[in-house]
Amino acid sequence: MKHSSVRNRLFISPEKSGRKITVIFSYIQRIGKQGTYNVRFLKELKKAFKGEWAAVRQFELLHESGNHKIYDLNPELLQRSMLDLAKSMRAGGYRIVVATIGTYENETPKDELAILDSALQEEISQMLHMLYLQEESEQQSLKNKQRIENNKWEWQSDLPHIALVLGAEEVMHWDIMDETKKKNNKLGRRFFDIISKLPHNHIVHDTAIGLQLPELNGENQWNYIADSEETLLSFNLALNNIFDKFNHISLSSLHGREDAKSEVKPSFLHMRGYGDRLNRGSDAQYRVMACNLGN
């Protein structure tokens, strides 16, 4: 696996050709929480505006699960240990998307997409202590490129988390949203309506992936080797002993199912973390829900 510092270029800008940014859509989501977004039109657009190019910059920050947030898993302190296990032994992170639409102005030597890419690079490098996962980033960006080249790229399918938020607001929250949020939702829909009408060869979608590292000055993030009686395995074995007497309970057997097995689980292990949410299968539920909401 290749990884390098965040000073590597996260997004490779296309060759400079006088790109002028007209509209910016920004989205941020803490994994496990609802995403928020904002749309900014840099100038007043006519209804017939179609745009000439679009660029999607997607940044995935992976926060690996592990023991660096757990002090101990002492079975004698059952409630605290279960809370530590539930809160800390799971993967997290953030997803950031900055999408732009613009035009070409050949008379200007500046390329605003290249300027934006550089600014995003600087902001991310100052904000986060992370490893840039070069191999994973290149693979994900290549998948995006292949879908674009094969005319299979669609914003609802390739950005399903955004489609879900826009659709959920319109279907579920419209009556209680204030006018500012309603206007923002309409602008967001107009933004992606413009993108959907662009030729695929005028769209780029790059993904950069980083792994958040523990801060050395954060005492609760120090890695440590737990005592043998306070490891996750020992904790699960202790819970298994507690619930062993209930292991014969099976609701399936009560309904006469031949494949009935024990249904009591004493504990659980943490989620897979290292990029697990980046495969298309993990986004399937987002795509299905976004489709059901009428996107």
Image: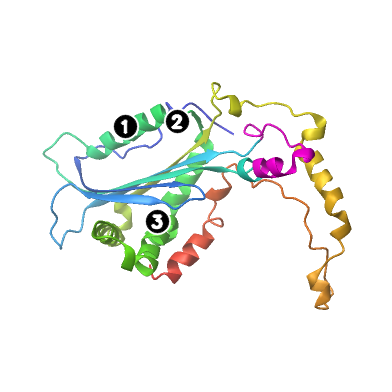
**What residue is pinned by disc 2?**
128
Judging from the image, what secondary structure is the residue with disc 3 in?
A: helix
**What residue is pinned by disc 1?**
118
**What residue is pinned by disc 3?**
162
Badge 3 or badge 1: first in the primary sequence = 1
Badge 2 or badge 1: first in the primary sequence = 1
Callout 1 environment at 10 Å: few (<14), some (14 to 19), or many (20+)? some
78 in relation to 46, above or below: above
| Cα separation between marks 3 and 1 | 24 Å
Quadrant of the image for the N terminus? Answer: top right
Quadrant of the image for the C terminus? Answer: bottom left
| Cα separation between marks 3 and 2 | 23 Å
**Amino acid, disc 1:** Ser
- Kindly indicate the quadrant of the structure image that contains residue 90: top right
**Amino acid, disc 2:** Leu
* Residue at point 55%, 51% (across, down): 279
| 21 relative position to 264: left or right | left
261 in relation to 2, above or below: below
What range of the chain is rendered magenta?
67-85
